[in-house]
Image (tube, rainbow, N blue to C red):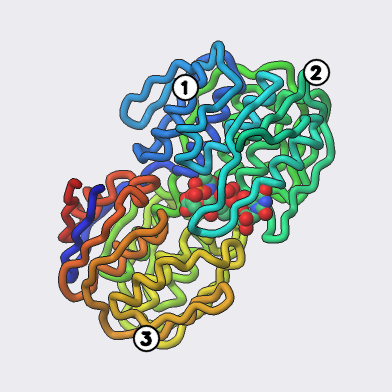
Amino acid sequence: MDKLVVHGGSPLRGSVNISGSKNASLPILAAAILSGEDCIIRRVPDVSDTNYMIQILSALGADVERSSGTVRITCADISDEAPYELVRRMRASICVMGPLLARKGRAVVSLPGGCVIGDRPVDLHLRGLEALGAKVEFEGGNIILTAPDGLRGAEIDLRGSNGPTVLGTDNVMMAATLAEGITVIESAAAEPEVLDLANFLNAMGAKIEGAGTRRITIEGVKELRGVEHTVIPDRIEAGTFMAAAALAGEGVTLNRICREHLKAITEQIIKSGHRVEFNAEGDSCTVYRGEELRGCEISTSPYPGYPTDMQAQMTALLVTTPGISLIKDTIFPQRFMHCSELKRMGADIKVDNGTAIIRGVEKLSAAPVMASDLRASAALVLAALTAKGSTEISRLYHIDRGYEHIDEKLLTLGAAVERVKG
Ligand SMILES: CC(=O)N[C@H]1[C@@H](OP(=O)(O)OP(=O)(O)OC[C@H]2O[C@@H](n3ccc(=O)[nH]c3=O)[C@H](O)[C@@H]2O)O[C@H](CO)[C@@H](O)[C@@H]1O
Ligand SMILES: C=C(OP(=O)(O)O)C(=O)O
């Protein structure tokens, strides 16, 4: 298992290109199942999650070629059973369920378990697909969905107790593209990644309106065609580099971003005392570390609110920001595994009932720490950038799930990092 050693104290300077979005790429790759023709998807980040999705598609019988950021997928003839050995490695493999059901009239996908960021049920996905006419059964740890006579449009409310569901909206939207009649999804997720998927599906010939809002209408079509599409920038990778620049930067420029998607993150970076300047096109920004820093209060919420996927990284920034900060995670109230590792580096954090109460300390000091999940590992890397000494972060496979070549990008900015192969 690889480790990352970060020697704290080197300032970050220069520019970095942000990759395509992992969370947009995953459902878009799965959506290629809906057509028998060639789909060409550009700017797919080279991370282990997209590689797993490609392996799942290949195992289903798709013809897949990957050349740097471009993936070509042809699903001329595919199976309806996603192999457990691959599916179990990545929770997001659940998004093959909707397209398989719509294309094949049957889908067998293993039931995902919880994960370290909290309980992660799929009841809303299943409720939505059932409303479209699918029969849902469970057997041997698998979900078996059948709709031998095809799916029918329906009105579906996807609101869960913690708000809308992103991949649930994706699954139902993908299945509804080939259903007979009109589907209306109320309380839909409005994340930019859902809109990117809808744009991909519309380019394939789907008839989707309202994606990016809480109400999505889909008029079913008979079939979908092949398409070429470029994935949106990764707003969470961009936010992570904004936090790195705020912590350890002397002026760091992020290129290939989307300003609109970064509003909530930018607002909090500025509130904590740093400066962010965007270019006129909104596709590049420079972050300057502030001189008068202050703690802030953040509560995660569905888009356009502050993303839960940037909670851990902001915690890492605030642990050395003077004053008291509060970070509440309303979406995954148990997503605070990074806090105990940050405390081992000298952070003063108390986690109580889904909220981290942070008292800013002057400096952290290096310690061997362990990554517990994707964003927690990013938080540890950020904390290590300014800590005194060399921090060794183990279980690096978590960060490799979602950050394309993070060590190389940090090295280019001047950080002293080393990947130790293990
Ligand atoms: C691959 C991908 O895009 N992952 C993102 C996606 O995950 P994912 O789509 O799995 O997360 P959801 O939006 O579904 O989860 C939101 C909330 O709804 C709950 N819920 C979800 C489904 C369901 O059937 N029942 C239910 O109760 C969850 O437990 C959670 O509290 O959105 C999350 C919330 O922005 C992000 O943290 C993940 O990075
Ligand atoms: C939690 C995340 O991903 P996943 O939903 O795939 O676990 C994430 O990207 O932060």
Q: Is residue 156 left or right of residue 10?
A: right
Three-letter amino acid code at the position of disc 1? Ala
Residue in the picture at 49% in, 44% down = 23
Residue 404 at what x, y percent from top left?
A: 33, 44
Q: Which residue is mark 2?
A: 149
* Disc 2 residue crowd, few under 14, some 14–19, many 20+, Cα 10 Å: few
- Quadrant position of residue 365: bottom left
Which kind of residue does numbered mark 2 sit on? Asp
Q: Residue at x 69, y 58 (%)?
A: 163
Task: Mark yes or no: residue 281 visible.
Answer: no
Any part of residue 342 in sight: yes
Tell me where residue 352 sits by quadrant. bottom right
Q: SS at mark 2? A: loop
- Identified at 65% across, 22% down, the residue is 205
- Identify the residue under disc 1: 59
Q: Disc 3 designates what residue? A: 322
Query: What distance separates the C-alpha of mark 1 from that of mark 3?
Result: 51 Å
Position above or below: 291 against 13:
below
Whole-percent x, y for residue 9 in the image: 17, 71
In the picture provided, is 336 more to the left or to the right than 418? right
Q: For label 1, count other residues whose C-alpha is less than 10 Å away and answer few (under 14), some (14-19) or many (20+).
A: some
Nearest to viewer (mark 1 / mark 3): 1
**How many marks do you count on the picture?**
3
> In front here: 85 or 195?
85
